[in-house]
Amino acid sequence: MMSKNIIVCGHGAGDPGAADNGINERDFIRQELAPRIKKYSGGEIEIYDMSKNCYRETKDGRGIHSLKGKIVIEFHLDAASKTSKGGHIIFGAGLKADSLDNRLADVIKKHFGWRHDRAFHPRDNLLNANTAKRIGVNYRLVEVCFVTNPTEVAYLKKNIDQIAKDFAEAITNKVAAGSNKPSTSTPGKYRVYTGIFKTDEEAKKQAKLIGAKLGYKPFPKEKRVWTGVFNTLESAMTAQQKISREFGFNPQIRKED
Ligand SMILES: [Zn+2]
């Protein structure tokens, strides 16, 4: 079942967002934060296609336009100086914080405090926030903390599980799923596959290129490239991200029986 709550990971595709202290927005949100929030949500949160940059998708009439009826939480890391600190929440100008915004603000306050002691910053110059407001999508953008602040990045990395759990509880408004010692992987059989190429020959050629650069035992089948089997969802997601970053091809993940 598709869930109502959906996380949008900021930036993506060719845009890494802000980078400092050994991490960048795109990869940290996609690889560390969002999958953990999903894991703790007990299936009540989905993640917007991580191979995509939602901002660009919205520009092209998809993105936020495709999320009507959803509750959207877009995650970013803020960037300014080494000493800038705290997180905050952005939504369309003129809108008021709802109960979800208040719960998310509590999580930020607990771990990082609020930037300039203010949780909510309505804005009228951000595409996704403006679009959501215009078409009536329940949306907010969470700036978790500052990627430019070494103390905050160290805290973020060290406490990522608790932070993710707190965000999951805030989003679902329930106590997080699982025990307090959660497994860090989702076992199963997964393959990554690309979109369709024009010819079988092209798929064959790209399979070779992917194999040479990344491994994963890729092979062509029905004009797509398929990888060998991964034994956890997380390892398949890593491969998906690498193929997407290195080659594009809109890779997806399929669970094998
Ligand atoms: Zn950002």
Image (cartoon, helix red, strand yellow):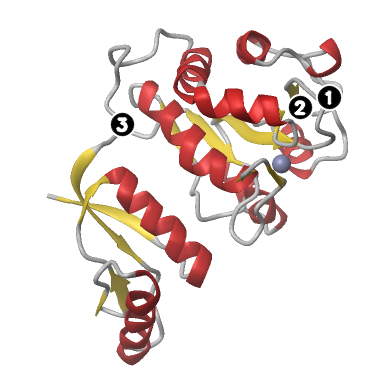
Give the mark nearer the N terminus: 3 vs 1. Answer: 1
Give the mark nearer the N terminus: 3 vs 2. Answer: 2
Q: Residue furthest left?
A: 257
Q: Which mark is residue 122?
A: 1
Q: Residue at x 44, y 22 (%)?
A: 161
Query: Which residue bears the numbered disc 3?
Result: 184
Q: Secondary structure at mark 1?
A: loop
Look at label 3 and name its amino acid: Thr
Query: Which residue bears the numbered disc 2?
Result: 91
For the residues marked 3 and 2, what is the alpha-carbon distance in whole angstroms? 32 Å
Q: Secondary structure at mark 2?
A: loop
Is residue 140 something that shows in the picture? no
Q: Is residue 75 left or right of residue 250?
A: right
- Note whether 228 is above or below 122 in the view shown: below
State the residue in front, 169 or 228.
228
Q: Mark 3 packing: few (<14 Cα in 10 Å), some, or many (20+)?
A: few
C-beta proximity under 8 Å, tags 2 and 1: yes
For the residues marked 2 and 1, what is the alpha-carbon distance in whole angstroms? 5 Å
- Locate residue 144: give its quadrant: top right
Q: Residue at x 41, y 62 (%)?
A: 251
Give the mark nearer the N terminus: 2 vs 1. Answer: 2
Which quadrant is the N terminus positioned in? top left
Look at discs 3 and 1 and give the one toward the viewer.
Answer: 3
State the residue in front, 45 or 11.
11
Q: Residue at x 54, y 31 (%)?
A: 70
- Locate residue 67: give its quadrant: top right
